[in-house]
Amino acid sequence: MEQDEPRDVTAVVFSLVVPVHNEADGLETFHARLRDAADGLGEPYEIIYVNDGSTDGSLEIIRRLQAEDDRIKYIDLSRNFGHQEALTAGYDFARGAAVITLDADGQHPTDVIAELARRWRQGYEVVYTVKKADPNVSALRRLAVRSVYGLIRWLSGMDVTDQADFRLLDRKVVEALRRTRERARFLRGLVRWLGFRQVAVEYEPAPRLAGAPSYTSAKLARMGSAGVFNFSVMPLRCIGLLGGAMAGGAIVYAVVALLCWPFLGGSVLANLVALAVGLTGLVLGSLGLVGEYIGRIYEEAKDRPIYIVREAAGFEAEPAPAERAAEEPVRSARPSEPSQIRLFT
Ligand code: UDP
Ligand code: MG
């Protein structure tokens, strides 16, 4: 593991990546906690704030923090790209031997960071967190979230229930993750898919320091569908099977209905109309489902960058453009750094 190898003492060991979208009110309190936790790690670290299109003065606070301490860096995205995209930017710019991501709203307790680091030092390459039941979440939302996780588990066989984007990834894993450039991003699923030695750490979610969550129901639904459609073609298969069974049933039904026509007349016709409507519904539903996948193919085909950076500060050298990650066979965070791992192509 890392501590057994000779190491450049000035090199960053921990990168702490924090996506920020309109968190001005609680940001300074959060930063004080984060810095204390980072200092407690006893190794050189960097803190990277990713400002994801905030409109409330978060960027000004981040700029001030950065001016006071050269371990603090920031990336300002050109607009609001979303939590997963902001995290992706953080992973691209981070250069630590271990990268820890956590939310800026105080819900991911900073005292768990020491535990993440401890597990990493034990040799785990992915230390992910699972949140205990949150008393601050309404029963309805909990039910919605549970159903989304259940659906993901059922369709893709991947259990990411109650996991958070609060995790530590070893450099090897970060480099592997950077090779996945799909647009509709679901990092929990991607990290699970990558493999490596993984271990879970439980944490008690805290209430927000200030403000309201920006994860609207629509965003939750978008992430849930990414969890299902990006990781499973089961819906396509199920609908195909269902369509086949229904078409077979309909043929049998039609034959029986036609044979009975002279005796039953109009009521059979009504049945046939109902059947036609039902089948049309099924076909349209299937088209919508197929469209989900085609839409994703379309998004990938456009090959747009996952995020766009307006400004980055505090970094010694510009990281290789993130949007080219998929084209390059093996990459590290800095163009001058040697590659640390050979990856599949
Ligand atoms: N966030 C972001 N971009 C967004 C929405 C949220 O960078 O479009 C950040 C936000 O500032 C916070 C984290 O992502 O640090 C989680 O967001 P939030 O607290 O709204 O989500 P929840 O707690 O409901 O998961
Ligand atoms: Mg939150």
Image (cartoon, helix red, strand yellow):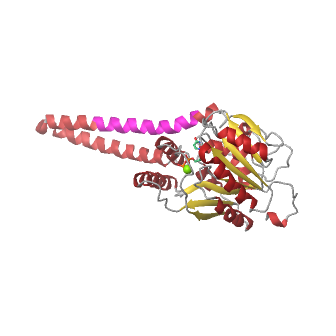
Instruction: Pinpoint residue 295: horizontal percent, then vertical percent.
Output: 53, 35
Question: In the displayed structure, would residue 109 be above or below residue 216?
Answer: below
- How many marks do you count on the picture? 0
Q: Nearer the viewer, residue 196 or 141?
A: 141
Instruction: Pinpoint residue 309: horizontal percent, then vertical percent.
Output: 70, 35
Please indicate, yes or no, whether residue 74 appears anywhere in the rendered image.
Answer: no
The quadrant the N terminus occupies is bottom right
Q: Which residues are magenta?
A: 276-298
- Is 177 within the magenta? no
Q: Nearer the viewer, residue 148 or 29?
A: 29
As drawn, is 291 to the left or to the right of 277?
A: right
Question: In the displayed structure, would residue 269 be above or below residue 223?
Answer: above
Query: Residue 35, located in which quarter of the rendered image?
Result: bottom right
- Is 288 within the magenta? yes
Q: Nearer the viewer, residue 43 or 124?
A: 43
| Outermost residue toward the left in this view | 263
As drawn, is 207 to the left or to the right of 7?
A: left
- The main secondary structure of the magenta stretch is helix
Instruction: Pinpoint residue 289: horizontal percent, then vertical percent.
Output: 45, 39
| Outermost residue toward the top in this view | 302
Please give the name of the residue rendered at 22% of the width and 42% of the height, measured from the top-left corner.
256
Please give the name of the residue rendered at 81% of the width and 65% of the height, measured from the top-left corner.
3
Please indicate, yes or no, whether residue 133 appears anywhere in the rendered image.
Answer: yes
Query: Residue 77, located in which quarter of the rendered image?
Result: top right
Instruction: Pinpoint residue 242: horizontal percent, then vertical percent.
Output: 38, 46
Please give the name of the residue rendered at 48% of the width and 35% of the height, measured from the top-left corner.
291
As drawn, is 85 to the left or to the right of 266?
A: right
